[in-house]
Image (cartoon, rainbow, N blue to C red):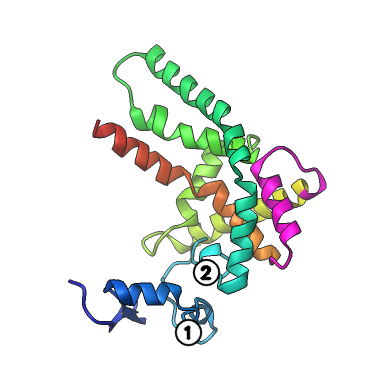
């Protein structure tokens, strides 16, 4: 039940304040005195036991003030209504092809394996123009990029390292030879915005590469299973 702010401990022993009442939550989220930067101070106890892309200090969700706004503006310029409308025909083409394949295979059909999983993979690969990377590799990165404490730390560290290196190389390539893809658009927007650290851009692109597979697959599967 909602109640006044109270001090609790996370499973790893880190003390945190639990805020549950609407007015208190609203104040914490809107008051500029509440910042994320103290969480990353060298002498601060970790909030999570296992690092991930989203928990990195370079993540857009961990930025404060102007740094956060600059990243949001850059992403917003890449996702203009015109750009989104440009994506519609080929997204529909991917959907139609997967549905045609399901019909051609005949019953029974595995909705997750043959539709919900490949759909976001193909769309993201085409959106970012990373078709040269095997889907299995990107799914491996996606599985470990946000891994929690139950995952093997060395597997997560290796996968995040590989993904970070790939995103760094991808940004360099699109800066020198931009194309009609989302990575190129985000790089152009962030360079135009100015003041965005390269590490934050790398984290943003890495998150875009792997961030939509599992959530989209789960949403599609759950929606179809309740129809």
State the image coordinates of residue 219 (x, y, percent, origin top left). Answer: 35, 41
Query: Which residue is identified by label 1?
Result: 44
Tag nearer the camera, 2 or 1: 2
Is 135 or 54 nearer to us in this picture?
54
Say left or right for 159 vs 199.
left
Which disc is residue 62 wearing?
2
State the image coordinates of residue 9 (x, y, percent, origin top left). Answer: 30, 80
Determine whether 99 is above or below 86 in the image.
above
Find the magenta span and give its range: 175-196
State the image coordinates of residue 160 (x, y, percent, origin top left). Answer: 56, 57
- Going 31% across and 75% down the picture, which residue do you hit? 23
Say left or right for 130 vs 95.
right
Say left or right for 135 vs 190.
left
Q: How packed is label 1: few (under 14 Cα within 10 Å), some, or many (20 or more)?
A: few
Say left or right for 179 vs 142.
right
- Dot 2 or dot 1: first in sequence order is 1
Please tell me whether residue 192 belongs to the stretch shown in magenta: yes
- Going 44% across and 77% down the picture, which residue do you hit? 46
């Amino acid at each position: 039940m909602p109640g006044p702010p109270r001090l609790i401990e996370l499973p790893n022993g880190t003390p945190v304040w639990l805020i549950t009442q609407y007015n208190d939550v609203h104040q914490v989220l809107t008051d500029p005195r509440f910042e994320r930067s103290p969480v990353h101070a060298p002498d601060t106890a970790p909030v999570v036991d296992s690092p991930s892309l989203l928990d990195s200090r370079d993540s857009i969700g961990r930025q404060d003030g102007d740094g956060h706004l600059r990243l949001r503006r850059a992403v917003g310029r890449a996702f203009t209504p015109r750009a989104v409308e440009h994506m519609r025909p080929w997204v529909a083409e991917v959907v139609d092809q997967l549905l045609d394949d399901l019909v051609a295979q005949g019953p029974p059909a595995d909705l997750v394996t043959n539709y919900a999983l490949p759909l976001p993979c193909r769309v993201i690969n085409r959106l970012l123009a990373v078709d040269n990377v095997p889907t299995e590799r990107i799914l491996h990165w996606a599985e470990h990029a946000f891994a929690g404490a139950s995952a093997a730390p060395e597997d997560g560290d290796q996968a995040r390292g590989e993904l970070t290196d790939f995103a760094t190389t991808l940004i360099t390539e699109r800066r020198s030879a931009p194309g009609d893809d989302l990575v190129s658009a985000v790089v152009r927007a962030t360079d135009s915005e100015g003041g965005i650290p390269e590490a934050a851009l790398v984290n943003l692109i890495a998150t875009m590469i792997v961030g939509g597979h599992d959530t989209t697959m789960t949403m599609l599967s759950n929606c179809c299973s309740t129809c």
